[in-house]
Image: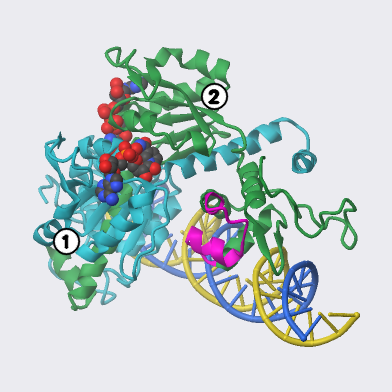
Chain colours: A cyan, B green, C yellow, D blue
Amino acid sequence: MSSPRSARNGGSDGSSAKRTPDAGAKPAERGIPEATVARLPVYLRALTSLSERSTATCSSEELATAAGVNSAKLRKDLSYLGSYGTRGVGYDVEYLRYQIAREIGVTQDWPVVIVGIGNLGHALANYSGFSSRGFRIVALLDADPARQGEDVGGLGIRSFDDLEQLVEEQRVAIGVIATPAQAAQDVCDRLVAAGVTSILNFAPQVLSVPDGVDVRKVDLSIELQILAYHEQRKSLAEAGADLETIDAIEKVI
Amino acid sequence: MSSPRSARNGGSDGSSAKRTPDAGAKPAERGIPEATVARLPVYLRALTSLSERSTATCSSEELATAAGVNSAKLRKDLSYLGSYGTRGVGYDVEYLRYQIAREIGVTQDWPVVIVGIGNLGHALANYSGFSSRGFRIVALLDADPARQGEDVGGLGIRSFDDLEQLVEEQRVAIGVIATPAQAAQDVCDRLVAAGVTSILNFAPQVLSVPDGVDVRKVDLSIELQILAYHEQRKSLAEAGADLETIDAIEKVI
DNA sequence: AGAAGTTTGTGAACGTGAGAACAAACCGAG
DNA sequence: CTCGGTTTGTTCTCACGTTCACAAACTTCT
Ligand SMILES: NC(=O)c1ccc[n+]([C@@H]2O[C@H](COP(=O)([O-])OP(=O)(O)OC[C@H]3O[C@@H](n4cnc5c(N)ncnc54)[C@H](O)[C@@H]3O)[C@@H](O)[C@H]2O)c1
Ligand SMILES: NC(=O)c1ccc[n+]([C@@H]2O[C@H](COP(=O)([O-])OP(=O)(O)OC[C@H]3O[C@@H](n4cnc5c(N)ncnc54)[C@H](O)[C@@H]3O)[C@@H](O)[C@H]2O)c1
């Protein structure tokens, strides 16, 4: 942590607790709510952005606006991590940024492998934004021999058979699947067997994994379809007629 | 709808209501819960998959397994659309598939524009999966003159200044932003001004939009960071030591 | 036709999350 | 040191989402 402003809030003196025994520390470490975990990265980015603009402190209101959430929600979220603000003042940007990064686990880089270097895999491999956010792509794997050897973003495409050795040697815990849906479950099984315990899946395919393995999916078609649903509601509502009638008509067709 | 099996469930006879006046129809049309809306596309895909394997009917249990959810949740979700199953039998795959597609609004195609044809934009433009799921990419726009004219997936890259005309002529309601974060808000404002009311944003940037405009974001770094959080929890738990101690130590650093 | 077996649709209990509101804590002025 | 202004951390309440459990409705077998 190379912050130019590492002075801390109130209890910066060595003498710890005066009133309550657990004053400055985290209240109950176990279990940050999942909804909160999903927002922490957003706060982290907002803080990084503030930091780049040389903002030293910020209020929950400012940070909430930057992150696009309610300020009460933000304060509650942060309270799960501990008591890192100063009443009447706000939060030290650098300090809070570090605390969130530490909580998420991105104070050091996680090695990542990407499997399936087609359209999407190329884009991911060429993306420079991961490295600054706690991740290091250590290998690009593809089953197609024609693709192997090609250089993408400074990394050569390797055979999928190198997987096991790679995971072992580089301590890879996170894998990205960007293969066709049809191959996704096989690739997933192989990743899990090799020791990967977190998977980000781009293939439109429900993956089944054993306990202890986390899967998150990114599905662009689903996102668009959700937008389409709301879009349809809007245009039906705008059409003025009551929805029951329209739906009744459409249903008969 | 060209289903080989268009016979319908129980009340297929013309005489409609016998017991309750609104027997076969939707109970209360207004407002499907957002969580349900987000799952309908998953069910749709599972049904399409079953349909391709020539499965005529399926139980809630089978469909739930295919979609990766609890069967009770699935039934409750479907109940918001209406009563499309047959007790003791299950659901007619084709029929249910159509009903969900209609509810989502993907029985006909939505025209979509993509703005920012860089790494990611190229991948999206080359992706063939959208057209079969209710979307038609009608234009690729980029501000960089050097990119304009290039052919990607059968479509030429056009100037961002063509936006307004395009939205007007093609009735575009959905826009995809794949520009750098720094340009995202400007592009967003321009899209909204042109008449786009749904936006899918890939840039790591919180967008502010007026009421009536929907924004969904896809943020890969956030997804990875969520995985990293859980991964960290796993490795800390595995290390055996109680978490409070480790966190306390790390916090002092 | 009646009984036995299936499967849906939904009411009710439970858990999680969001937001308003406020006391506690902090700063700075006088 | 005290007072007024500011902002956090937390409590309380309400809304939303998930899961259980079961009656109603349907099929099939005898
Ligand atoms: N391209 C997009 O913009 C986009 C959008 C939405 C979803 N997706 C999904 O992302 C996935 C990848 O899309 P794409 O457009 O890059 O596809 P693609 O066909 O261009 O690339 C797939 C790559 O995976 C490799 N592959 C196939 N089987 C493999 C295996 N068993 N092991 C390792 N590698 C294997 C292929 O050789 C190929 O290089 C697909 O599931 C697609 O549905 C892509
Ligand atoms: N590539 C990935 O895999 C990836 C992963 C995660 C997030 N993202 C995000 O997606 C976005 C695009 O990523 P990329 O790798 O394709 O970037 P890129 O730099 O390759 O492409 C950006 C494109 O946007 C165009 N552009 C810039 N300003 C514009 C404007 N005002 N109007 C129209 N077009 C404009 C540029 O000319 C360029 O072609 C970025 O915000 C990035 O952070 C990308």
- Magenta stretch: give its range: B50-70
- Relative placement, left or right, of A171 versus B49 is left
Residue B172 badge: 2
Give a yes or no on whether discs 1 and 2 share a subunit. no
Quarter of the rendering occupied by the N terminus of chain B: top right
Q: Nearer the viewer, mark 1 or mark 2?
A: 2
- Is disc 1's CB within 8 Å of ligand 2? no
Q: Quadrant of residue A104?
A: bottom left
Q: Is B67 part of what is drawn in magenta?
A: yes
The residue that appears at 28% across and 38% down in the rendered structure is A118
SS type, badge 1: loop
Give the distance between the C-alpha atoms of the residues marked 1 and 2, in whole angstroms: 57 Å
In this view of the protein, can residue A99 be seen by the observer? no
Count of numbered badges drawn on the protein: 2
The residue that appears at 16% across and 35% down in the rendered structure is A153
Q: Quadrant of residue B120?
A: top left
Give the quarter the ligand 1 occupies.
Answer: top left
Question: Mark 1 sits on what residue?
Answer: A12
Quarter of the rendering occupied by the C terminus of chain B: bottom left
Q: Is residue A27 above or below residue A114?
A: below
Front residue of A97/A237: it is: A237
Q: Is residue A36 above or below residue A210?
A: above
Label 2 CA crowd tier, 10 Å (few <14, some 14–19, many 20+): many
Q: Amino acid at mark 2?
A: Val
In this view of the protein, can residue A154 be seen by the observer? yes
Point out residue A194 in the picture as x, y percentages from the top left corner.
20, 63
